[in-house]
Amino acid sequence: IQHKIMMKKKSISASKASLVLFLCQMISALDVPLDLSQPPTITQQSPKDYIVDPRENIVIQCEAKGKPPPSFSWTRNGTHFDIDKDAQVTMKPNSGTLVINIMNGGKAEAYEGVYQCTARNERGAAISNNIVIRPSRSPLWTKEKLEPNQVREGDSLVLHCRPPVGLPPPIIFWMDNAFQRLPQSERVSQGLNGDLYFSNVQPEDTREDYICYARFNHTQTIQQKQPISVKVFSMDSLNDTIAANLSDTDIYGAKPVTERQPILLTPTGSTSTKVELRGNVLLLECIAAGLPTPVIRWIKEGGELPVNRTFFENFKKTLKIIDVSEADSGNYKCIARNMLGSVHHVISVTVKAAPYWITAPRNLVLSPGEDGTLICRANGNPKPNISWFANGVPIAIAPEDPSRKVDGDTIIFSHVQERSSAVYQCNASNEYGYLLANAFVNVLVPSLHLFKGVKGSILRGNEYVFHDNGTLEIPVAQKDSTGAYTCVARNELGKVQNEVRLEVKDPTMIIKQPEYKVIQRYGQVSFECIIKHDSTLLPTVIWLKDNDELPDDERFLVGKDNLTIMNVTDKDDGTYTCIVNTTLDSVSASAVLTVVAAPPTPAIIYARPNPPFDLELTGQLERSVELSWIPGDENNSPIKNFVIEYEDGLHEPGVWHYQTEVPGTQTTVQLKLSPYVNYSFRVIAVNEIGRSQPSEPSEQYLTKSANPDENPSNVQGIGSEPDNLVITWESLKGFQSNGPGLQYKVSWRQKDVDDEWTSVIVANVSKYIVSGTPTFVPYEIKVQALNDLGYAPEPSEVIGHSGEDLPMVAPGNVQVHVINSTLAKVHWDPVPLKTVRGHLQGYKVYYWKVQSLSGRSRRHVEKKILTFRGNKTFGMLPGLEPYSSYKLNVRVVNGKGEGPASPDKVFKTPEGVPSSPSFLKITNPTLDSLTLEWGSPTHPNGVLTSYILKFQPINNTHELGPLVEIRIPANESSLILKNLNYSTRYKFYFNAQTSVGSGSQITEEAVTIMDEAGILRPAVGAGKGKEDWKKEIVNGSRSFFVLKGLTPGTAYKVRVGAEGLSGFRSSEDVFETGPAMASRQIDIATQGWFIGLMCAVALLILILLIVCFIRRNKGGKYPVKEKEDAHADPEIQPMKEDDGTFGEYSDAEDHKPLKKGSRTPSDRTVKKEDSDDSLVDYGEGVNGQFNEDGSFIGQYSGKKEKEPAEGNESSEAPSPVNAMNSFV
């Protein structure tokens, strides 16, 4: 046996993190060169369960290597398979791969079976797995008669698929006749078994082409089930059908669609079990029926669903956990819930495991006389049985080898000889599968040993890592790692060795870096670059300007540790970099040169200090170390202090933490350390200007592991369910663990009940759930940290509580004391604390109005809720409505929710003052009377006793006349006021009264008519005897008309007609005028001077109106508003223009009707909606609010929506538009 020995000297900087020495290229256990003898090794084989396409050739792979090349043989179903006797079977050359020719007449079914390949040479025999060959199958659906599914709307439905059994199992999906997938939702979904589930059916589910398809991937075929018909009967159609076919007693099925609480369609019952294999995907399913459609939620009892491995599918009806392990065993609960209730199912999951390797046997390459072991360690659930084979034969009947001893899962070899070479098979099997591994023992290779120094001992310890190929790795190189390392390989014929010399050098550092310079033109500047390096290394210093070579100029002088520039010019501006290279490392530093004009006087430059350098660790102890450093330049500002930071390269590499700080005069510090931390330190100098850049990190120092010093903080115990206790804590940080394998010991016991603690050790998590606890009882809890070296100090105990449940009883002795018409006080007795079953949060009072005592019952009951925190036993109920009947109940509240309600308590509120009347209308104006109509108050707040009407005239100067008050019985709704002055405006104030007092008032204004007719509309005809009828057109909103020019003592017939969509209708009456009388007015009217005066007045009025009309078109305004304000009721707010009342007349508002084409037509008719003179504009409107005592008050201001101007002022001074119409 020959070895290639390499002699090489290696050097490495001490700042490097790890070192790898290739001391010996040992012949690897798995990579023995094939020019040496080697037993066979299986390199490629077909899968254990091999499903083949029956239409294609079957290829069963078996490849192996070895020296000499192995020969191959096969067994089928445990007996030798002679391939020479079967013309359809061939073996590939130089290979064990079988090819079974199916495409030329062979049948795949004839070759079903269990195959095993053996590769053999003179040094042993390796065997493959048992390869089970099965052709895929895609059978047709069995024909069956499918009855139509007739189902009532809202009921659940399951459409069964029942696909044929194929190999492998088919993929199921549902489509229609058009090959379109059927839509699925929370209501309609496909189960894991392929059935289609309806939580509740709807009329749109009616169709005749529900088709289940099965796709067999191996054969690329799709099989189709016969279409399934579903007809959903709605309640109306079902009632008709049932009524026509069944008796009255049978019509129970015709009930309307009712909501139902959930029930589970699958799985059935309250519990079930599920077994899954380790590493597989766990699928759990819950599908529920109900209306509304239930929502599914999953929990794991006593724990949480695994993070990053849990997924929800099929609208959360399927819980999917990938890569399951034994830790995933437990009870999984699915909860289906809708607004009417919930149902749950517990699936007990057991994770079994086919055998899996803990330590698979590895090839052994030994020298004669050496010892070795083959270890075959596997785990599973149940625990697998281990059996050994030698060259494919059970070891019990294999040829004996005196160097071999079998001890359970281990074969021990002692003083092996060349004849001990063989291939051993380990078979680990249980009921869920098996593992088969080949490992050879090849007696060839000499033993290897590693030494440090000429007479050193064999290398051992955690500071070294030994690789299988002979490589030695030193993870953290230190100065004391320097030395000679020797690898010795020996066998019975002799030995050979290889030596490597390792030198660990000091890192190269720039201890005086070039500094930023500002120099005046034609001056001289120098940059320093002083370095510190290992004495055995030869550094080279290179200067660059702006990352390029220095200019070829004799003004640039490069010295040993500086760069000098003579006679500086503007083009010398830039960045100058000093680069120091050795054969091991390279460092650099830069500075900026700024060239300026010569200043009058040089200024002192203050800057941040330069970083400290040359950090050194001494006096290393388990919990402390001394750090020293050399300060950098302070740059004209004294250093005030140094800040020391550390990096934990083991737990948080790259993150620097504050350690301590010392005064600026101190350059050494004793640092306290924590166990199991790989420390690096750096120092920052601070002066008045600011902080320096951090220094270069110190060398690393790894402290030893120790027990944890502290326990987790913020330990709490709060239950999330009535039967559990959730214990939480804040985990320790990485460096607080003090060692590897951080875990927590969680302990608990029921306070004042249990003497013994129950404990469990959990991984590095921050929560543990205790299941099966009583509801809301106190527990003593403690959490203790531990690692691989031991426990932290005994932790302190905290008190927690298991989960809360809803309170059990309602408050008793509920009493109500009514304070006034809008306020009441409620009292109750507290519930016993034991029945609260949780933390008492307070009490809730639900109260609602049942009806008004005035006889108006509420159509919609709106419950109000008041919450009183803590253990209060009374509360105030504000905002009640007067003269009403109320109900209330009281409930206790804890952290889980509300308890049952107390019996409803009825109480009544006394009377209050009423709101304003709902409306006030003034109609039928005559010369001396007005008719008032009103509506009762919306909120009478009691029994009305009377109405109060006040009114007063308004003269032409807008002054208010004397106020008249009238009391009206409460049962009246109208009043005719007589003996009024004609053509006079009146203002009315109207309110209602109860026994408590008067309510808010509503105001209106109206005008009695003049003694002449105004605007004309419907036709009024008057005739005497057989004379022709005279006709006048009167405004449609008028209910009277004054006939003039009649003859005294004459009988007349009068007819009033109205024409509408239904035609012309009229009524007649006969009257007789009185005898002629001497009249002063008639005498005056017949005088010429009076007629002339009237004509002059009419002309002046015409001119005035024309001028006003022109001004209004220009946006002019008339100050009527100020005069109206002068006579407004002091108790009533003045009404505004947009309220539909009298304000300043504006062109923008008054001409809206004109813009809509409201000029008087040629037939002198005016439509009602276009009239400017109508009392409709003074309608009612209410703006209401609650006052402080809860009673309802309102302001009734005659407010209406803005509309085109409507005429209601025919008795007042006419508007310009009306005036124009009058003179047409």
Image (cartoon, grey):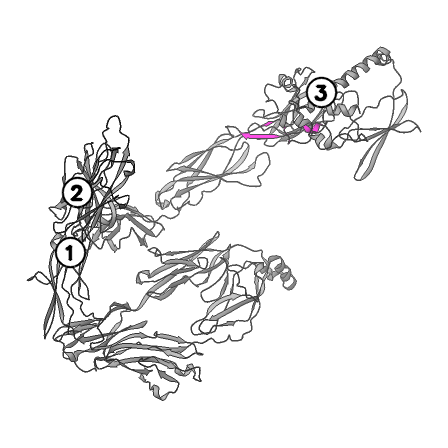
Q: How many marks?
A: 3
Q: Quadrant of residue 342?
A: bottom left
Q: CA distance from mark 3 to mark 2?
A: 104 Å
Quick one: 1167 or 776, which is closer to the camera?
1167
Determine the secondary structure under disc 2: loop
Q: Which residues are magenta?
A: 1173-1201
* Disc assigned to residue 561: 2
**Disc nearer the start of the sequence (3/2):** 2
Location of residue 719 in the rendering, given as x and y in whole percent from the top left corner: 33, 49
Instruction: Name the residue type under label 2.
Output: Asp
View extreme (left): residue: 455
**Disc nearer the start of the sequence (1/2):** 1
Q: CA distance from mark 3 to mark 1?
A: 113 Å
Location of residue 86 in the rendering, given as x and y in whole percent from the top left corner: 37, 87
Q: Nearer the viewer, mark 1 or mark 2?
A: 2
- From the image, which quarter does the N terminus lie in? bottom left
